[in-house]
Amino acid sequence: MKPYIQISIRTKTETVDWECGSQLIESLYLGEGLLAPELVSHNPDKVKEPFEGKAQAKRLWAEKGSMRVNGSLSDFFYDFAWKRKKVIRSLGYVRHAKRNIRNQIVPGAVILNSSYSDKIDWLHLFKVWCEIFPPQLGMLHYFTEPELQPHMLNDSFQIGSFNAALRPDVPNAGWAMFYGNEFAEKVDADRIARADFPIEKIGDGYLVRVTNDIQDIVADFRMFAQRRTELKSLFPEGFFLD
């Protein structure tokens, strides 16, 4: 499996408003438009409709559907997915937050898997998305050979799932993590800053990085892994699953 960049966000914020979709599309044109969609769909497994612009995206964004649940019709919002086959190859989707039959908020998800390019400011893109979709949890990571071993494939860290929808876990620390909502309460910002880890307060949460440069993962993975272990030790015991 080839190395790839992943951005994964869980958000409790309502995302169905087209303003969220409009800002998302605009963000994909940052960095010379190298993430601009070529294909769009409601289904990230079948992205085949040529992308024609914002008017089309607005039609697809949070399009309403209905399904029968326990004998009665229930409305839902379709996912929005986009894909790029040219350089840079990428696939992303938005799954909208909703309420279940118990009126509990089921967080939405924003996922991007992409080939790496140094022409894209990945940290800036992550920050932009954290503003559009204020995260409950968020991760930006560069998966390279040491973390792409066969026994690691499709685990919760690599696929950015954060496990359970209602009560997400933190499987491991990516290069950059956003801790919002209940997770922000576990962040000892002063202690992390004193240990020389980059940390920023954004809204009601914290963006914490293992190193200053995401390329450190490639340049010296052993150093990165050591710093990640040190960073994780600054969180409460059991905060991370790994």
Image (tube, rainbow, N blue to C red):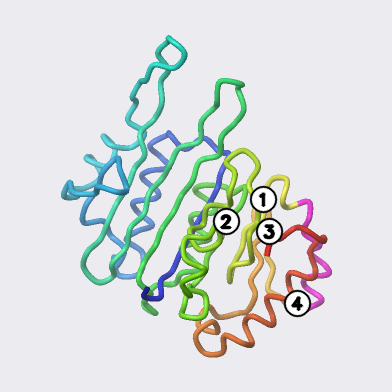
What amino acid is at disc 2?
Gly
| Disc 1 versus disc 4: nearer the observer | 4
Name the residue rendered at 62%, 27% in the picture.
Answer: 104
The residue indicated by pointer 1 is 180
Q: Earlier in the sequence, mark 3 or mark 4?
A: 3
* Measured Cα–Cα span from mark 2 to mark 4: 20 Å
Secondary element at tag 4: helix
Q: What is the distance, in whole Å, between disc 3 and disc 4 at their CAs?
A: 18 Å
Q: Residue at x 65, y 51 (%)?
A: 169
- Residues at circles 1 and 3 in contact by the CB criterion of under 8 Å: yes
Secondary structure beneath label 3 = strand
Between the residue at mark 1 and the residue at mark 3, the CA separation in whole angstroms equals: 7 Å
Q: Residues within 10 Å of mark 3 (few under 14, many from 20)?
A: many
Kindly identify which numbered label has been placed on residue 206: 3
Of the two numbered discs 2 and 3 on the same chain, state the one appearing first in sequence.
2
The foreground one among 148 and 131 is 148
Label 2: which secondary element:
strand
Q: Which residue lies furthest to the front in this view?
A: 151
Left/right placement of residue 37 relative to residue 147 reads left
Q: Earlier in the sequence, mark 1 or mark 3?
A: 1
Residue 232 coordinates in the image, percent (x, y): 74, 69
Q: At label 4, which amino acid type do we have? A: Glu
Q: Is residue 206 magenta?
A: no
**In this rendering, which labeled residue sits more in front, label 2 or label 4?**
4
Q: Which residue is drawn at 50% across and 36% down?
A: 97
Look at the image and give the residue range highlighted in magenta.
185-195
Q: Please give the residue where the numbered disc 4 appears in the rendered image.
A: 230
**Residue at disc 1, secondary structure:** loop
Disc 1 to disc 4, C-alpha distance? 21 Å
Quickly name the residue at label 2.
Answer: 138
Label 4 Cα crowd, 10 Å radius (few <14 / some 14-19 / many 20+): some
